[in-house]
Each structure stands twice: as structure tokens, then as C-alpha cells.
Image (tube, grey):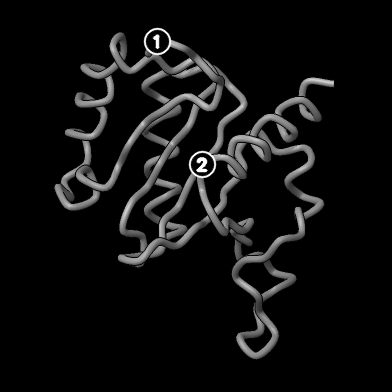
Amino acid sequence: MRKAEFIWKILNHADQNYKGWEFLYIETGLNYREDIKTKSGFILPVEYINSSIIPIKYSNSESENIVLYAIDAYNEEDLKKLIGLANKLSGAFAGAIDILFPDFVINGNENSVRKVTEYFRDSNLARKIKVLSYNDKLIQ
């Protein structure tokens, strides 16, 4: 039930916050041919049903952007891994990278996020990162 609830919650969040979003399809051994490869779309890949991370992308007038939804609670180690994953997935195309956890509190974790982003040498990457919660909260 936990995974189904996670998927339902993030689909609703994405619909409300990221106009025109699509699932980001990760390269695997099954989609290696450039002539038939699709990098994103509206169909939830079967691999994501059991995944603890779901990547999507959306475009605005300025750029294409990546969003990573995580099922697990916020912690610095997972944030490091997710920033690395987002960097790998985006190449250099992403104008912004949003990483969303269920329990992230902006006014309680901002120093932790700053510490993690300073770990990465690429200051341009660090400026793109925004960490948020996908759970509705009246006060962050």
C-alpha cells in the first residue's frame, strides 16, 4: 500500500505544480537504440512501480527541468545520492532540479541542504538544486 500511496501522492503533486510534466525514462539495456529511444513520456514505466525514486521532467519558457520524488524520509546521505543521480540524468540540460521528500521542512533543514550542496564542486549544479516536500503543509 505504501508504494501505491506514494505514486498517487506524487502524481497529484506533479499535476498541481509542474505543468506539462512527463516521466523521465532512464536509459537501460533495453532502450539503447537512439533511433527508437524515447527519453520521456506520459506512461509510468513498470520499473517505477516498485521504485523509491520517481523522476519526472517539465519545461517552462526558459528551460527543461528535472524533479526527483523520493519515498523515504529526508537525510543528507540520500540527498547526496539524489543530487548525483539528477546530475547524471540531466547531463547539462536541466535549468532547475527539484528534489522532493515527504517530510522535508524548509525552515528546519536549510543548513543541512547547504552543507550537502557544498560537497559538490560544481557550483552551477548547486545553484540549480531546490529541496522541497511533496506533502501539503500549511507552514514550512
Q: From this viewpoint, which residue is outermost toward the right?
A: 1
Please report contact status of discs 1 and 2: CB closer than 8 Å, yes or no. no
Q: SS of the residue at dot 1?
A: loop
In which quadrant is the C terminus drawn? top left
Query: Is residue 58 shown left or right of residue 49?
Result: left
Residue 105 placement (x, y as % from top left): 39, 14
Q: Quadrant of residue 127?
A: top left
Q: Is residue 129 above or below residue 64?
A: above
The residue drawn where x is 73% and y is 46% is 48
Query: Is residue 2 shown left or right of residue 63?
Result: right
The amino acid on which the numbered mark 1 sits, given as a three-letter code, is Ile
Distance Cα–Cα, label 1 vs label 2: 17 Å
Residue 68 placement (x, y as % from top left): 51, 42
Q: Quadrant of residue 102?
A: top right
Q: Is residue 7 above or below residue 127?
A: above
Viewer-nearest residue: 7 or 84:
7
Q: Which residue is mark 2?
A: 17
Q: Which residue is mark 1?
A: 139
Residue 100 placement (x, y as % from top left): 48, 31
Numbered label attached to residue 69: none
The residue drawn where x is 45% and y is 52% is 66
Residue 19 placement (x, y as % from top left): 53, 53
Residue density around tag 1, few if under 14, some if 14–19, many if 20 or more, within 10 Å: few
In which quadrant is the N terminus drawn? top right
The amino acid on which the numbered mark 2 sits, given as a three-letter code, is Asn
Q: Is residue 20 above or below residue 112?
A: below
The residue drawn where x is 76% and y is 59% is 43
Q: SS of the residue at dot 2?
A: helix
The residue drawn where x is 25% and y is 19% is 110
Viewer-nearest residue: 118 or 61:
61
N-terminal label among 1 and 2? 2
